[in-house]
Amino acid sequence: MIDNETIRRYREDGAVVLHGLLDPATVARLREAVELVLADLSPHGNEYAQPGEARFAQDMFMAQRPAAAGEAFRRLVHDSALAEAAATLMGSRQVRFFYDQMFVKEPGAVAPTPWHQDLPYWPLRGDQICGLWCPLDPVDLDSGAVEYVRGSHLAGRWYRPRHFGGASGYDGASGDPMPDIDATVAARDRLSWAMEPGDVIAFHGLVVHGAGGNRSAQRRRRAVSLRWMGDDAVFDDRPGTYPFEVAGQIPGSPLQGKLYPQVWPRPLQAVAR
């Protein structure tokens, strides 16, 4: 389902939608898993809403959890079409899993997701690094659909990461301050899609993106995002990134090991299983 035109748009625009990539059974499993995670956020989770506001929560590393919640995300990593889609769009011979993340904006959650790039938060370098954003509810701009600045991954700019909760930034992080995207980028240069559960957005690690609050009175906005590393993605031991587990990793080499497995092509032992 990924033709040459879709690949071209991903590489030029920095983001593209893939309709119907996940089947209904996978979406149903993920909805159940998200509810389990919401009831028990990990130390990596965050609550972004202020007291009295509708809930806006996130968590990470669900595939590392035991029991049902973790199993649903491990199946998404290893048994879905996501890894192959990432490889096709990036033009990579192989793809490793980096990590997963969950976002939930309940109806009326006014807190936005600030404009940012993903890669400055991560201890990685490379062009073949992408995310796949998977909504579990129908989503549009009214309920907090993500917007992407067309072609911003090609601008050669690296914007300094900052905490979504309002703190000024990550200690020691490099990069320029994020400009006022709302004031400077016209609507025609922003990409967003009305999506159904099962649709997926693929986006480059350096494309600028953000999302408004969930202005809907009734619709939830649940989504999961999986991040993938291609051939040229390597560990970058620079200051000011999120504290991923990188003990024993070698700067300038791909992240390796149990936490960062090769998923595409499937290893022979996984195919046999």
Image (cartoon, rainbow, N blue to C red):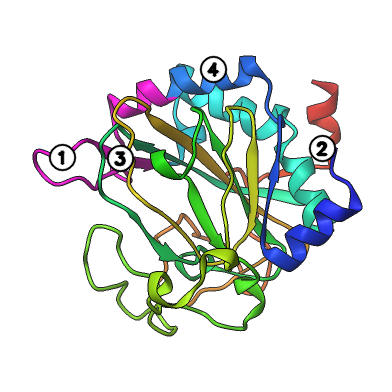
Say whether disc 4 or disc 3 marks the residue closer to the N-terminus: 4
| Residue named by callout 3 | 57
Quadrant the C terminus occupies = top right
| Alpha carbon distance from label 1 to label 2 | 46 Å
**Is the residue 26 above or below the residue 162 in the image?**
above
> Where in the figure is residue 27, as x and y percent of width and height?
57, 22
Quadrant the N terminus occupies = top right
Residue at image coords 29%, 73%: 169
Provide the secondary structure element on which disc 3 rests. Answer: strand
| Residue named by callout 1 | 53
Provide the secondary structure element on which disc 1 rests. Answer: loop
**Is the residue 138 above or below the residue 88 in the image?**
above
Q: Which residues are magenta?
A: 34-59
| Residue named by callout 4 | 29
Res 267 label: 2
Q: Are marks 4 and 1 in contact (CB under 8 Å)?
A: no
| Alpha carbon distance from label 4 to label 1 | 28 Å
Amino acid residing under circle 4: Arg
Within 10 Å of disc 3 (Cα), the crowding (few <14, some 14-19, many 20+) is some
Q: In front: mark 1 or mark 2?
A: 1
| Alpha carbon distance from label 1 to label 3 | 12 Å
